[in-house]
Amino acid sequence: MNIQKKIIVFVSALLLAFGSFAQSSSTIYEGKKFYSFSVKVTPENVKKFTIEDNKNNFNHQQYVQLDVKDNVFVAVASVVDANCNSLGFLAINGRILQRANTGNGGGNFYLKPNGAFLVTQNDIIVCETSQISRYQSNIVHGIQSGPMLLNNGQINSNFGIASPNKRIRSGVGTYFNKKGEKCVVFVIADEPVTFYEFASLFKNKYKCSNALCLESARSVMSIPYIPNKTDNSSETICRYIKFVF
């Protein structure tokens, strides 16, 4: 077993010791490196997710250094305008602060279908925007972003295999492990990738049914025990998806 594999095994065991069934890892897929954080979806773990505003307006590097410890995972949450207002659905602590946006426009957010990451009382949902209303009465936290990478196991038909549009992308998907247990996985690319490449990772590596792109232009993710390039980002992120175990 090489050193990198030993580190990953050690990290996995350490995270499992916290009782959250969480795992940090890095992987090479189609010659490119990705970092991931996966969590088993249980009623206990679901309650450990929050969506929090960056109230002190720290840039991401400052936020990580001051507010993120080894038992904390964070990822950029929602696409926003210049005033930090979400372009789409936003719910925090059971309050719906912004309704779903089904309009058209420019930019990745409006590349259809877009979708949502939802935390309900007992579950984690990744779904198309049109399905948010099915869960609305039970949503504790939620954001709308886009585009959907996978919908019912199928790669978004708007993605070009040979697209020149490459970014450091971050995303989230849900899948079932070999034991039939539902899990949620957050992934960030180490280098610029196309939407098609990113969607293929969720489909073929993680066997996700649904997956959503969280951000492309301003992707950040802080993963316990596994540093990545975006930990040093000077971007100021308006709000974060946060998991504390």
Image (spheres, grey):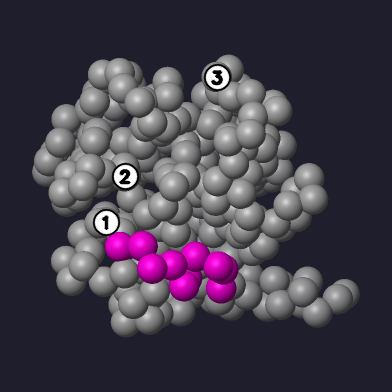
Rounded to the nearest angstrom, the CA distance separating label 1 from label 3 is: 28 Å
Front position among marks 2 and 3: 3
Q: Front-most of 111 and 179?
A: 111
Q: Does 36 appear in magenta? A: no
Identify residue for label 2: 78
Rounded to the nearest angstrom, the CA distance separating label 1 from label 2 is: 8 Å
Helix, strand or loop status at disc 3: loop
- Sequence-first tag of 2 and 3: 2
Q: In the picture provided, is 87 more to the left or to the right than 60?
A: left
Q: Picture coordinates of residue 212 (x, y %)?
A: 47, 36
Q: In the picture provided, is 31 more to the left or to the right than 208?
A: right
Q: Picture coordinates of residue 17 (x, y %)?
A: 54, 76
- Give above or below for 121 relative to 212: below
Identify residue for label 1: 239
Q: In the picture provided, is 236 more to the left or to the right than 37?
A: left
Q: Residue at 24% across / 36% down in the picture?
A: 87
Callouts 1 and 2 close, C-beta under 8 Å: yes
User: Looking at numbered disc 2 in the image, what kind of residue is underneath it?
Assistant: Ser
Would residue 135 be seen by someone viewing this image from the given angle? yes
Specify the farthest residue to the right: 1
Front position among marks 1 and 3: 3
Identify residue for label 3: 158
User: Looking at numbered disc 1 in the image, what kind of residue is underneath it?
Assistant: Arg
- Give above or below for 127 relative to 15: above
Q: Picture coordinates of residue 207 (x, y %)?
A: 66, 37
Q: Residue at 12% across / 41% down in the picture?
A: 97
Callouts 1 and 3 close, C-beta under 8 Å: no
Q: Residues in magenta?
A: 227-236
- Sequence-first tag of 1 and 2: 2
- Sequence-first tag of 1 and 3: 3
